[in-house]
Amino acid sequence: MSLAINGGAPLRNKPFPVWPVWGDEEIENLTRVIKSGKWGRLAGKESETFEKKFADAHEARHGIALNSGTTALRVALMAAGIDAGDEVIVPAYTFIATASAVVEAGAVPIFVDIEPHTYNIDPEAVAKAITPRTRAIMPVHFAGRAADMDALQKIAQKHNLVIIEDAAQAWGASWKGRMVGAIGAAGCFSFQSSKNVNCGEGGIILTNDDVVAKFARSHHNCGRSEDGLWYEHFYFGGNYRITELQSAVLLAQFDRYEELHKIRQENYALLVDLLSDIDGIEPLVPDENITSHACHLFIFRYEKEHFSGAPKAKFIDALRKEGIPTSPGYSIPLYKQPVFLNKSFGPRGKIVDLPVDYSKDFCPETEKACYEEAIWFTQSILLGSEEDMQDIADAIEKIQAESGSLVP
């Protein structure tokens, strides 16, 4: 059977589910807010209601909603006491916001490698990267899979470090029964358009630390104090507040989440079973400590030697032509991003000379993930049917059978 990339008929012609999923609830909530005339976070009760619901669902005492997940990370670092020049250890395989938020907070991101079987930050690499200037660890619960919080907490306690969880992709994930985002000093989530629950943009900080919560509220609200006058500004901050319109959408999305989460988890498990039988396709290994997977991405490792040596990019192109939307994931490690290589952290790319040479960084597992192995399916694909999951496996098997035609 000729591959579609070579002019043959594609295995699949129908679309996968579209994202976002929405209904009358979002429209009704938005209509209510618009008619109230209370559109800003300070005037209404939508944001306050959502903060409490989200915090309660994640077993946190405090929730502070903001205008983005990136802002949430920066404000959380500041609220946790991270100071100018402090080093914050972050994974090299993640979205740039994890590291850029560190720079924005005045600190220095230190990149370490990921575990190849989880794609989460490697605790052994974290331990080796600690210096007298290290002040925090920022693990990413990547793709919605909880990082090894036992190992990371042990390291943090030994060296008196702060843990700020980047849980942008991990709404609903848990580690040994504990919801992520409320395990470290603070955790940050994103509600950007691609996320499993979204309002276009937005984010939230969760914490069980009263002091962190106090300063997070101040930093995101122009440096005000809850005990001060309205035009008294006690701390450095800005207007990073979420709007009532966004929170109204989130409240509707919140009520729909469990139903969609169950579908994603079922399809995730099915896809693991289907793809594990194909040589050269390795889903990330399960872990009994992960008591809930948020299923933001489905990731597998591609081994080209089982596909006639066809490079990752060629395999992805072939899979897309068969009707399977596929992502190569991050194209380069964070330490190879031009902004870090050039230290272009100032206005218009002005050089800010942080005391680290990112050109010397090398994380082998991250490099393999970027250039050779990592392939993603987004969470909306996981909202499909069992037949949809079978089509993915059938398309990969079809490509494997004709893989010789993909190489010269």
Image (cartoon, helix red, strand yellow):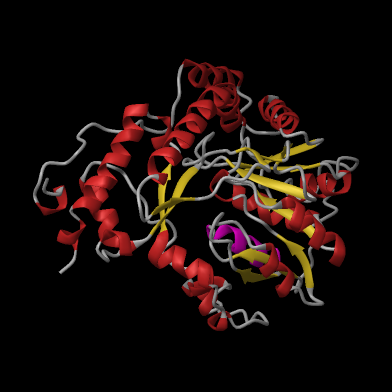
Give above or below for 66 relative to 334: above
Is residue 312 in sight in this rendering? no
Which image quarter: residue 85?
Answer: bottom right
Q: Quadrant of the N terminus?
A: top left
* Front-lying residue, 191 or 328: 328
The rendered magenta stretch, by its main secondary structure, is classed as: helix
* Front-lying residue, 338 or 267: 267
10 relative to 189 in the view: left or right: left
Residue located farthest toward the right when viewing the structure as drawn: 227
Which image quarter: residue 197?
Answer: top right
55 relative to 97 in the view: left or right: right
Q: Is residue 382 magenta?
A: no
Which image quarter: residue 134?
Answer: bottom right
Report x, y in % for residue 185.
80, 50
Residue at image point 27% right, 57% down: 315
Q: Is residue 96 magenta?
A: yes
Q: Quadrant of the C terminus?
A: bottom left
Report x, y in % for residue 23.
45, 19
Report x, y in % for residue 327.
37, 51
* Front-lying residue, 23 or 331: 331
392 relative to 231 in the view: left or right: left
Give above or below for 42 relative to 213: above
75 relative to 225 in the view: left or right: left
Is residue 136 in sight in this rendering? yes
Report x, y in % for residue 235.
82, 55
> For the magenta stretch, what is the residue range?
95-106
Residue at image point 42% right, 30% down: 383
* Front-lying residue, 109 or 112: 112
